[in-house]
Amino acid sequence: MTSSIWHEVSTVATEVSENNPQVADSQAMILNRYFSELAKHKKYLGSAAIYQNGMRQYHHTLGLNENGETVSSEQTLRYRIGSITKTFTSVLIFTLIEKGMLCLETKLSTFYPNIPHADSIAIAQLLGHTSGVKSFTNVPDFEAFESTRQDVETIIQWIESLEPQFDPGRQAEYSNSNYYLLGQIIEIVTAENYQQNLKKYITDKLGLMDTYFGGDINTDSREVHSYKMQNNQWIQISKPAHMSVPHGAGAVISSTHDLSVFIHALFSGQLISESSLQSMFEIQNDMGKGIFKSEVNGRVVYGHTGSIDDFISLLFYDFESKVSVCVLANGAVVGPRAIADELLAAAYGEEVTLPDFSCIKLSGDELSHYTGKYTSETAPVDIDIFIHGSTLMLQMTGEDPAPLVAKSTAEFEFLEHPVSVVFEAGLRQFTLKQGIHSDIFVWHEPCD
């Protein structure tokens, strides 16, 4: 079902004190302790911010010093933001529509007639991930060419060769191909490159100095590399993606400041018209046109997330309070979603939970009781739980495996996201808890 919430959120009263949070000094101090714990235990590198009405309420950055130690920094750093780029691409498309250069009904065949079903796929379906075009980033050979420059013709031919996932408009499924194509369409229609359009229609309007189409990482310009944790050390990613590959789906560089100003300006009507915003907020399967609907601490928020190389990003906006939270990570064991939970709690004067990284060691025999394939009647994924070395691993359908940390003999945590797995005594099942949501998974069969 598709629904529009724009009228509702655009008329919300903001006079009630509980809807106008300020980050108190006491909450800021607790957040500082929170980030100190992340630094101490080598769980996170990046910048995090709370803004209200486009104005900064709190900001914290953790980076690496010359000795490889995690330290706080006052610098405004620039990060690859991955799929948050899609929100910028969506704004550019709506801008061109308002200028009469495109229509939501314009068919993909106008630009790329050889893509399957191109004559039935409209711009609106690319924006809302209802086109059925398969994501070229999900094919097996993608990593082989991701880190080298690729010309447009090569990637278009790749997309043309992919079997459609479904007929256009039949369902919604996230696909990077949609926004790669939209990025190219922007350049075709305007006869200017993506960066020129981004500058003309967004960054110059808002005075954003840290936001632009990315290239090779330039640390002299306050751009950062991404890192992964190996053997308790942050190891720099040696082959980052070449920005010709993600293009309009994920090639933008930005900062917490610029993203926070951008999302407030967008949702307060400073960039595109109310009718365009209303179209953007037509939600199907929690996806709008360049935005997502999500829930944090029981509050509905809108925005986008992203990942590229080992950068992970999150940008959420709460309409009732006009509060935004932005987390940009260039190294994450504890992921941005878990951090966003605590940022919003602080923004509303609620309890900030300091991270607890204590764990217990279970034997292989103890862990073996939990292995198997599990299914759920309420969740759209299956889960495999297996042992790798001496670690219990959890793998959802279509996702990479992730380690579970034992908090007790029955409770485990997946620290990259705020997810816990609680096994039921005497039953071959567990409850997967994420925020206020929980699903029961029941043992189905042994792992392969």
Image: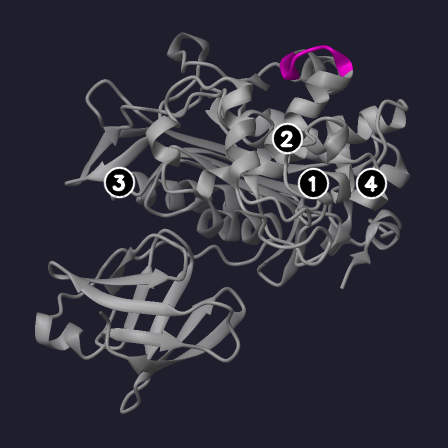
Residue type for callout 3: Lys
Query: Between disc 3 and disc 4, whose residue precedes?
Result: 3
Q: Is residue 41 left or right of residue 183?
A: left
Q: Residue at x 63, y 36 (%)?
A: 115
Q: Is residue 40 left or right of residue 120?
A: left
Residue type for callout 4: Leu
**Looking at the image, is 107 positioned above or below residue 30?**
above
Q: Which mark is residue 181?
A: 2
* Distance from the alpha carbon under mark 4 to that under mark 2: 21 Å
CA neighbours of label 2 inside 10 A, class few (<14), some (14 to 19), many (20+) = many
Answer whether labels 1 and 3 touch (C-beta < 8 Å).
Answer: no
Helix, strand or loop at label 2? It is helix
Q: Which mark is residue 42?
A: 3
CA neighbours of label 3 inside 10 A, class few (<14), some (14 to 19), many (20+) = some
Residue type for callout 1: Leu
Instruction: Using the rendered image of the protein, determine whether residue 15 is visible from the camera's viewpoint.
Output: no
* Distance from the alpha carbon under mark 3 to that under mark 4: 40 Å
Instruction: Look at the image and tell me in which quarter the C terminus lies.
Output: bottom left
Residue type for callout 2: Leu
Q: Which mark is residue 277?
A: 4
Residue 25 coordinates in the image, percent (x, y): 54, 41
